[in-house]
Amino acid sequence: MSATYSIRDLAQEFGVTTRSLRFYEEKGLLSPERNKQTRTYDHADRTRLKLILRGKRLGFSLDESAEIINMYDPKAGNKNQMQVLLGKVREKCEQLQEQQKDLESMLKDLRTVEDRCLVSMADKTEGKV
DNA sequence: CTTCTTACA
DNA sequence: TGTAAGCA
């Protein structure tokens, strides 16, 4: 009754390579059962992989995701886990806002240069026409 | 043919 | 992480 998955099953389902799954394992994010050399993943492993990929989408490093995921502790209501996650999320938000600020600044400068180019080209055109 | 490990890009 | 080599 315990659904299991081969390294391929999960790789295909989540659109990642088997290399990635082994890589995540090396980083301590995954710990599939070992049946005679080959890996056998269970539902818990699948869930962890799901969380790893979510963390990736949120911009967290594998180490950060590992820190949070490995903190899973139903007995304690996952309070510590939530606290750390909240901290990471806020930190990430601040970083993104900082990046957004920089991007807007660069965009502003680029547009200034763009305008100067257009003006310059317009002047030369008028002179010839 | 597929998985696994190890090493290198 | 991709790729490749050498095994099982």
Image: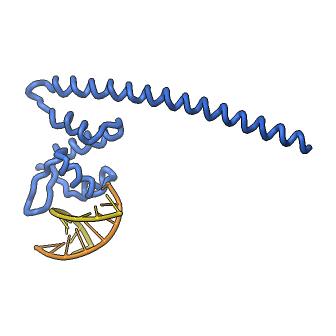
Chain colours: A blue, B yellow, C orange
Q: A99 or A73: nearer the eye? A: A99
Instruction: Determine the residue positioned at 58% across, 32% down.
Output: A107
Query: Residue placed farthest to the right in the image?
Result: A129
- Answer above or below: position of A14 versus A118: below
Report x, y in % for residue A19. 26, 57
- Answer above or below: position of A123 versus A37: above
Report x, y in % for residue B9. 35, 63
The reply, left or right, for residue A59 in relation to residue A63 is: right
Q: A12 or A25: nearer the eye? A: A25
The reply, left or right, for residue A79 in relation to residue A120 is: left
Report x, y in % for residue A125. 85, 42
The reply, left or right, for residue A64 in relation to residue A108 is: left
* Quarter occupied by residue A22: bottom left
Q: A76 or A66: nearer the eye? A: A66
Instruction: Determine the residue positioned at 21% across, 46% down.
Output: A46
The reply, left or right, for residue A100 in relation to residue A12 is: right
- The C terminus of chain A: image quadrant: top right
Instruction: Determine the residue positioned at 16% across, 52% down.
Output: A41
Report x, y in % for residue A44. 16, 43
Please give the count of numbered marks on the rendered protein. Answer: 0
Q: A102 or A3: nearer the eye? A: A102
Instruction: Determine the residue positioned at 49% across, 26% down.
Output: A101
